Each structure stands twice: as C-alpha cells, then as structure tokens.
Amino acid sequence: MLFSDFYFREPYTCTHGTHSQITFHLKICNRGEDTYANVILSSAFSGKDSILEPLCFPDQPADTSSPPGVQCPGSEPLVCLFCSESVPPPRKDVLLRHLLMEHKLVIADVKLIADVPKYLLYWKGRFLEQPLTDFCSVIKTNSTGPVEKQEDYFLLCDVLPEDRVLREKLQQKRLEEVLEQQQKERDDSSFHRLCMFCSEEFTGNRSSLLNHMAREHSFSIGLPDNIVYCSEFLDTLQDKLDSLQCLYCEKTFRDKTTLKDHMRKKAHRRINAKNHEYDRFYVINYLELGKTWEEVQSEDDRELADDEDDDWSDWQAHPVSAVCLFCDHQSETLEQIYAHMKEAHGFDLHLLKTELNLKFYQQVKLVNFIRRQIHQSRCYGCTRMFDCRADALRHIAAEGHVMKLPEMSAWDQPQYYFPTYENDALLCTLSDSEEGDGDEEHRGEEIPVIAEDISNLRALKQSSVLKQLLKERGGSS
C-alpha cells in the first residue's frame, strides 16, 4: 500500500513504531520521482466529509467500486477499536468516519479486507495489549508549524507484517468458505427454479437451468462450475427483470414486452461485466488478495516464464464439463460423456467415426450439425420438425433415429465448422489420432479452398463497370 493514497493539505512527517521521526517520501504514479507529501485529508479538520477510502492522484481516476469477492455482507457488527461504538456492516462508512474523527485512525485499503468484522476484533484486542504507536505509522500534520497546531494521525496498513499476515489469513479463510459453498452447490440435487425467460421448470442440478438459458435463450452467465451463491445470483437477475430493467445496459422500460424486444434486438441478453454487484458470484474474484477478475485476466503470463520451479506435482487439470448432445447431463471426463450418450441415448460417436472414417473436421461438423438440428426441434435423421425440443428427442428415440444420419452432403458443409454453442467442450474431446502418419497428403481434403476464378480474365476486363463508365465519360466529352 502506498502512502500516496492519502492527501494532506499541510506538510507532515511520519514515524512507524519506535523509529525516529522522518520526513516521509512517496512516489507518484510510479514515475520514479520522489516528492514531499502535500496532500489533504479531505475536510476532516473542518468537520466536513472525510476520506474513508484510498484516493488517487488527479490523473489516475479513483476506483470507488469495491473489489468484489473480497467482502460479503454479514450480520456480525463492526466494532470500534477504542470504544464501545458499533454499527451493522452496511454502515461501515459511519464507523470509519468515527475512527478518523474521534480517534484519528485511518485503516488503509478497507475494501480489500475479506472479513472486516474479524479484522476489527483482532486489532481491538491487540491495541489493549500494546500501545497504538507499536503498530501504526504516525503522521504529524503541520510539522513545520507551531507545536499547538500539530496533530498526530495514525495509519494502520499492511506495511506492518502482522497486518499483512492477518489480511492474508482472512482472505484464505474466505476462499475456503467460498470453495466449500461452491462444492455444495455442485452436488446439490434439490435445486428448483423457473427459467427467467420462458418459465420452464427445472429441478435437480443448477446446471440444467444455466445450460437451458444459454442454449435456448442465448443468455449465459458463465459455466456453472465458475459460479458461487447461484440462487442469490439468479434472484438478483430476476429482481432486475421484474423491475423492467435491462440486464446489460440497465435502462428501465415501461413494460415487459418492450424490455423483451429491447434485449433481443440490441443483443443485450447478457449481464454487464462492469457492474461489480455481480462479481461476488464468480469464484475468480476470491483467488488473490486485492485482485478482481479483470486484473487476473490481464496478467501477462510471460512474467511467469522465468520461474525455475518446474514441479508440476500439484497440477490438477480443469474438468472438461462436456454437455451431452441430447440432454443437460454433464461429465468431467471424455470417457464418461461418451459412455453416457451411448448408454442413455444409444448414440455411439466412436462407432460413427469408425464406420464413416470421419476425420477431425468432419467430426466437428457432425457434432455442430446435430446440436443445431436439436436446437431447432428437428430430427436430424428424417428432418421432421416439432413444436419443441422435447418432442423432437422423443421422436428420435421412439423411431430409432439416434444413429440414423442423413447423406453426408447434408452435414459435411462449411457452415458447420462454427460451433452451435459457445465453449462447447465436447468439441475439445474429438481427435483423429487413429489416422496413419502416411495420410498427411489427405489431411486437408475436408477443408474447402475456393480459388479465384481467372479463367476468362480478358472478358472480365472488357465487361467491367469501370471500363463502361470510362467509355460513357469519353463519349460525353
């Protein structure tokens, strides 16, 4: 934490613990230029609003949003470190203002503390054991002025090793709680909820609803395994829709029909990634202290290339979570998803691959073709259309069309190179490893290459629009 996060109007000096008083230096915006601090603690000295969160220099806009996933509202009260004052968690700013105005204490980076109530209780006990100056940096305002006008303010931050360790332990405990909650939700079979868009009822595992909304309504909030507090997340989204609010641009409309048309026409069937209200529902936001998903995603992996630790013994591969072609069942291994489709639906992709001698890209096109036909409530074997997907699946099973494919020309087309569903993990399970090395000259045959037609270039030149315009222009002149 940089002390440049706090502003003082007057020159000040800073001490930490029992160290001698020193003039404090800071670096501005990582430019490498040291300067004496001449910043302001808002208008705390005049009794007006006070700074309760870290500020930034004018050329670096302040981020007023709390890094999600770090704090979750709870019922445990927030206690003052020095007196009997306490407030409920939603009134955190009131307690921070009280600490500043009454006790001249500022806690740095409060928004990065995973569990503020436990953090305050810990330091309340420590301050009873040892003097405040043993832990806090002391900032003396107006250090060059008369003694009677000087004031000491105390800064509690993670520069102190004990504070840093405490914050990391609270973060680790929060992560463990979140992962435990996530596992409970993954194993929960009592999930029951209506779809937000078509009111279809879903029971069993939460993935059935999330996959349905992604597949049938093109609305995806991410893979089920990446989400935590799922029911609360869906409640939040449902409340916004009930309030006639678009989930993406967050504009409010006069009725449900207008809202529905707006979200469909504007392709707003998605959530606003910049709305940090949603961030606590994604596990990625709990992984590293003080980092949001945007910061984790933007990290340059090349910085890790020089790491000499080649021990991969603790590596755990991420589950595949491939979705069945015919139902919402998911499996974490290739063998499981293939076995499920064969046993539950009688569909043997391995057999089709062998009988038809399908190469990799042909398998891709076949999977995308079947997905698209079922999405459109059509039997891929006989092309018969149905009113809903469930009727189509019943027909396919009853008529024995599961392993019945149309002519290869119907599905071996370039349009089926493109996935029907985003992040279709089933496509990642396909391979052409059984092909011999001697077939390399045939590997590109299934990829169409359309050559430019230059068979009659002279005729094209003579009949070009440009030549005709030039003729007309020459004639008119």
Image (spheres, rainbow, N blue to C red):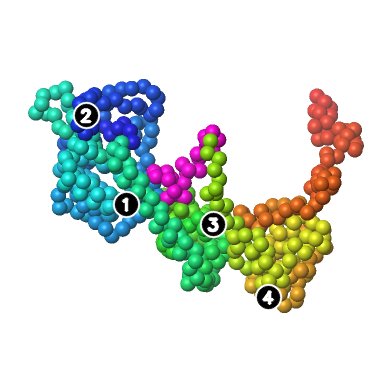
Q: Quadrant of the C terminus?
A: top right
Left or right of 28, for residue 209: right
Q: Nearer the viewer, residue 312 or 341?
A: 312
Q: Which residue is mark 2?
A: 19
Q: Which residue is mark 3?
A: 223
Is residue 288 highlighted in magenta?
yes
Alpha-carbon distance for marks 4 and 2? 79 Å
Q: Which mark is residue 394?
A: 4
First to last magenta residue range: 284-307
Residue lying farthest to the left in this orientation: 148
Q: Which residue is mark 1?
A: 115
Q: Residues within 10 Å of mark 3 (few under 14, many from 20)?
A: some
Circle 1 — which element?
loop
Residue 306 screen position, x and y as percent: 54, 33
Left or right of 30, for residue 100: left
State which tag comes first along the sequence, 4 or 3. Answer: 3
Q: Nearer the viewer, residue 47 or 91?
A: 91
Residue 437 screen position, x and y as percent: 81, 47
State which tag comes first along the sequence, 4 or 1. Answer: 1
